[in-house]
Image (cartoon, helix red, strand yellow):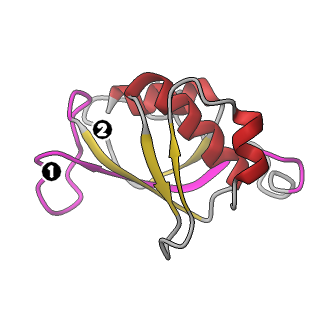
Amino acid sequence: MAQVLSAFREAGCHGVPWFRVAGHDLTPDLPGCPDPATCASMGGLDLGEVSLGVVDRAAGDEPVELDQAVTDIGFRKPSGTAVLAAVVALASQAGSLLVFDDSGEHVFVVSPGDDPTHLAAHWPW
């Protein structure tokens, strides 16, 4: 969990967390959108609504622990630029990641050291 939050912060992304972390303020890691009215048109890094799956999470809305391993990350209504920034930052910390859209039609593997400019040329979102 800490690694994912660090990647969001490093990438400069913002969004709405649909999860809670016990004893941790998420605002520095995933702040709200500073200007919702113009964010998308200005190329803002809005991840939209962010969900995280973690190992050993009980069903319900219980807070997760900062040291729990994240198994999956979901975004609802994100900016494609923000997703790319977050994935590149996370891959540099966690290793190669499989990224796909809701339909599974578009699938990417993002690896540490990948050039974001090259990825952006082929990024479907």
The quarter in which the C terminus is drawn is bottom right
Say what secondary structure mark 2 lies in: loop
Any magenta on residue 58?
A: yes
Q: Residue at x 18, y 63 (%)?
A: 60
Residues tagged 2 and 1 counted as in contact (Cβ below 8 A):
no
Q: Main secondary structure of the magenta part?
A: loop
Q: Residue at x 87, y 54 (%)?
A: 38
Say what secondary structure mark 1 lies in: loop
Q: Position of residue 105 (x, y in %)?
A: 54, 73
Q: Nearer the viewer, mark 2 or mark 1?
A: 1
Q: Quadrant of residue 118?
A: top right
Q: Is residue 93 above or below residue 15?
A: above
Q: Determine which residue is flagged by label 2.
A: 21
Q: Pointer 2: residues within 10 angstroms few (<14), some, or many (20+)?
A: some
Looking at the picture, tell me which residue is in the foreground, 110 or 20.
Answer: 110
Q: Determine which residue is flagged by label 1.
A: 57
Looking at the picture, tell me which residue is in the foreground, 87 or 68.
Answer: 87
Any magenta on residue 53?
A: yes
The quarter in which the N terminus is drawn is top left
Q: Position of residue 54 (x, y in %)?
A: 23, 46
Q: Give the label on residue 47, or none.
A: none
Q: Give the magenta-colored segment's residue range.
A: 41-68
User: What amino acid is labelled 2 in the image?
Assistant: Val
Left or right, 28 with reference to 58: right
Q: Residue at x 54, y 40 (%)?
A: 87
Q: Is residue 33 visible?
A: no
Q: Position of residue 48 (x, y in %)?
A: 60, 56
